[in-house]
Image (spheres, grey):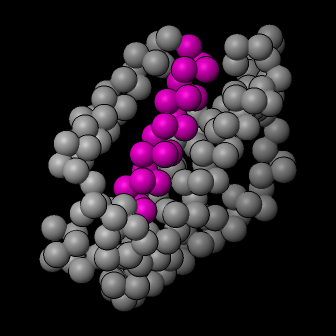
Amino acid sequence: RSYYVLDRDLLLTGLMFKFPPVILEAMDYGAVAVEVTGFFLLLWGRTPWRIWLIFLGILHLGNALFLNISFHFHLIVYLPFLLYPIHSDRWIGSKFKRFELSSCKPVFAVACGLATIHIVTRIVGAGGTCLFMPNRVLEQLAEIYVSTIIWPVFIVYGISTLVFSRKPGV
């Protein structure tokens, strides 16, 4: 549908027609398997859970590159799970220390300001759902290109949390 109806032929979409149907079917079932196994890997431990998050990043990057489907909003859900192990000694210690938010205040203030501007422009009927763009076609293009930037960063960051973890088995 995206290729024919929405005329999404960006990036590597043309290569999808070169894959044998058996491979595409296997990729379909593989994506479902990756999505379903998350709960079990969460119960198994932190390292399998983080590896699963990295695979999700790879899956969403593949969707952006090959199918021109953006899942950039999923990053909001996945990123805290990668950030938590890195900062867990500050968030939860043996005496339940409180995380210091003083270093986050400027970023939080800018994010709140942008969110307020965005919400107000949407309420008055202006703007778009992504990056304040009123043009839906440009918005969809931006979503795909943003996905091709954020998912590799997410993947590299996830791998770095595995490699440079301060605690064994974390």
- Residue 83 location, quadrant: top right
Q: How far across and down, in percent of the image, does residue 54 sit? A: 54, 37
Q: How far across and down, in percent of the image, does residue 160 sit? A: 73, 37
Q: Nearer the viewer, residue 79 or 37?
A: 37
Quadrant of the rendering where the C terminus is positioned: top right
Residue 80 drawn above or below residue 148: above
Residue 48 appears in the picture as rendered: yes
Identity of the residue drawn at 16% across and 75% down:
4
Determine whether, in the image, residue 64 is placed left or right of residue 93: left
Magenta region, mostly helix, strand or loop? helix
Is-magenta flag for residue 56?
yes
Determine whether, in the image, residue 109 is placed left or right of residue 45: right
Identity of the residue drawn at 24% across and 63% down:
17
Identity of the residue drawn at 16% across and 67% down:
1
Q: Which residues are magenta?
A: 45-65
Q: Nearer the viewer, residue 86 or 14?
A: 14
Residue 18 drawn above or below residue 37: below
Q: How many numbered callouts?
A: 0
